[in-house]
Image (cartoon, rainbow, N blue to C red):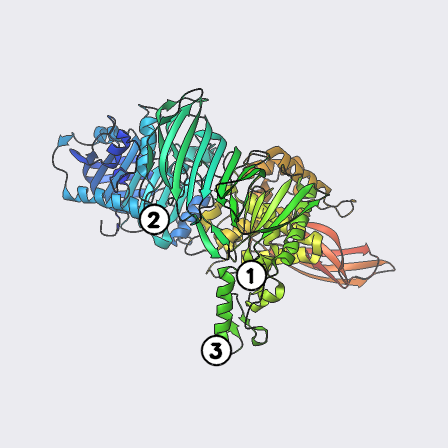
Amino acid sequence: MTRFRAVLFVTLLCLISPVVLALDDPTYDALRDARLDGRQVAVENLLLERDAHRFTLESGTVYFVTPVAERTIGAVFVGQGSYVLNPASEHERDHLAFRLGKRNDGFEVLRDRFESLILWFGDDTDRELMALGGPVTEGTPSAAATKALEDARRWQREDLEKNLSIRLLQDLLDVPGMTSGAFMALFDGQDELPPAMALLDPRGVEALSYPLMGGEDTALLVVDGTQGGFWYLSDRKGEVAAGKRAPFSTRARALRYSVDTTIDATNKVTGTTRIELLVRRPLRVLPMSLAPMLRIESARFRPVDGEWQDIPFIQENEEEDADVAVVLPRSVDKKEMFEIELSYVGEDILKDGGDENYYVGARTSWYPNVGFFADPANFELTYRIPEGRGLVSVGEQVESAVENGMSRTVWRPSHPIRVAGFNYGDFEMIERRDEATGITIQVYTNPGTPDVIREINNFIRSAQGTGLEGGVQALGDAPIPREVVDPELGSINTTKLAESAMIDGINAAQIGGAYFGPLPQRHVAITQQSDWSFGQSWPSLIYLPYMAFLTGSQRNQLGLGAGATEFLGSVGYHELAHQWWGHQIGWASYRDQWISEGFAEFHAALTAQHVTGWNSYTDFWGRARETIVAKARSPIPAYEVAPIIMGQRAATAKSPFAYQALTYSKGGFVVHMLRMAMWDPSASNPDAAFIAMMKDFTSTYAGKAPSTEDFKEVVERHMVPALNAAGDNTVDWFFDQWVYGMEVPKITANLEVDRAKRGTYRIQGKIAMAEVSDDFRVLVPVWVDFGRGEMARIALLPMIGPSERPIDVTLELPKKPKEVVINARHEVLARN
């Protein structure tokens, strides 16, 4: 165990720090305190197979952990062993090869060796070890085995920061006697792997507090600095071979949240949350999400028509494995309803940003919940804050009063929502009702000067007279020219800038309503936050970064480069688009998150087109193309890293920006390409077919979490000839290439136009496609450009694989084109 810094994994079972419990749960305490009990088995060439994982214990000894609830749930192997991971899909094989730097080495399977292996399990691994090994004997555990277990405790606590004891507790208590639970194996590879955990969990990796993973249950998780992450994550081999994705849902669905929050003058937060739940599968242990800095003081349980009773809760050290769970008095059956109430307190949820501007931290876990961005639930949110301060919440304010120097407000969303949030500070508000959509847009700004502006002014002042040649290097990607550097950023007229945010909000709302259908709520609040570059959308509530409220000249003073300026110019559109994409329509798993972020990017581009014209739209996708195909601060372009469906896992030390480039930019590009393939320039509304498809998608999946395949089915319901490129009445070819695939073609054209006879023009030349597989398909758009922004699309030419297509056609045109071009609006994502 030389490298295992925190040598393998888990003892979750380990008592690492005092547990703060109102009531103790004896089974949990036993798990945290478990030790090797002296039982041992000598093994030789013992094989353990768990789907894609294959462990061979070649020679050595297995030591067992003290039984808990009359079950053996852990063991330590010391000796010589080997590990093989055989990926279930080519996507996962390629990603593993990329992680290992072996893409060009004919990589097939991962092989490594180990000298110790920590096993935790809710299945019958103990029986398998005893049956396949030698006779069980009693004796003193070896020093190496004891040390491996102690190191594993440290690794769980300090590096993994996941309370694995909670996961084992579920297997022991939810359905007593069940032996089909989780299998977790921890080891330190000698050749390829840093400290890692191999996992097979029938409940999916969500059960280890990794949310939004969609039920995938076979994983290899590395926890080692910049190399960390899920190197492998998949459904089981049989499911993958059958083309199925394992369905996932939480074991209990929240029907209603009642959240009561008090913020005192020191920004200390005290809260009580009551949750009404419906059980989907039997459970007794209920994991929950709550920010570690919020410390639970009590937990209560009440069955339907029953009495409240105190129950144990689990929450370890704030800086370590602080996952939260409650232990119910009994196993609760499927379809049964009950309530949970938690009370908690903490001091670091709100940070003073200066002049009554506040950062709201723990955005998805400032209240206890059983899955953010999961099932929609009803909410009632009560806030008590010092009189004179302001607060804006999701929902609509339905009550307001002043009690003992505290302002009390109650907010209720008009419909079930997936997650709740609020913004806090001193606000001024303007509002306007948009008659076209019926939506009222409110904009909240802070009239003061936050610390971020003071810091920027200090920077600008300190930059004066530095003698830097060419200008002052500031916050952006280019120097500030000396002639525009002023002594101060100047005052911020937030009222004037609120009008700009209002107009952006109305424009994005109108485009959303026209193209995708109505929102369930009748208002959206846009609020200013102190963070200079971070925006976020909640149901009916949006955070815009402070810099989005600055004028163009003020941004110039800060030296903001083109990238930052473009982001700030579209962030308002993007965040309001999330009212449709992310809130009204969710996403099934991390593999489908492009349905939120990519669709919001497309929505932003569409809004820009309708506000400022086609050039803005085309430029938007030109920048997106560059993001996808260029080596942006990375040795490899994003499109070569992974397909869109790799989601957040595409971001690695080798490709830190690939997630954004693929999920946002390429995801948006996919929707853009669909739109342009469905575009009918001869129709009174060229977008009519596309609009019908998108409204069908939103109405079908409103309040649900669709997958990529769900979206594909809707596209096929609205098939147009251009999308039937393979002739099989499916869009498999399109999704296989652009969503599940990684190829991006090179497409070139050499076209000339000459007058033929009166009113007709001859176009000659060729179009070529290169550096793609033989069955790669595109529809190349051909345009005539008459100048001064006047253009017309004259053809969509199908091309397959590396090929050239000669062009010789005579057309009637109103006048001679200046030139003939292809892909004028980036209808096809191409490298050039």
- Comparing marks 2 and 1, which lies closer to the viewer? 1
| Identity of the residue drawn at 55% across and 71% down | 480
Q: Of circles 1 and 3, which is in front?
A: 3
**First of labels 3, 2 by sequence position:** 2
Q: Which mark is residue 564?
A: 1
- Name the residue tied to disc 2: 223
* Separation of marks 3 and 2 at Cα, in angstroms: 44 Å
Q: Secondary structure at mark 2?
A: loop
- Element on which disc 3 rests: loop
Judging by the rendered image, the residue that carries numbered circle 3 is 466
* Helix, strand or loop at mark 1: helix
Q: Using the numbered discs, state the Cα–Cα distance from disc 1 to disc 3 in whole angstroms.
A: 25 Å
* Mark 3 vs mark 2: in front: 3
User: How dense is the environment of label 2, judged by Cα within 10 Å: few (below 14), some, or many (20 and up)?
Assistant: many
Residue closest to the eye, 403 or 645: 403
> Which residue occupies the extreme left position in the image?
139
The first of marks 1 and 3 along the sequence is 3
Q: State which tag comes first along the sequence, 2 or 1.
A: 2
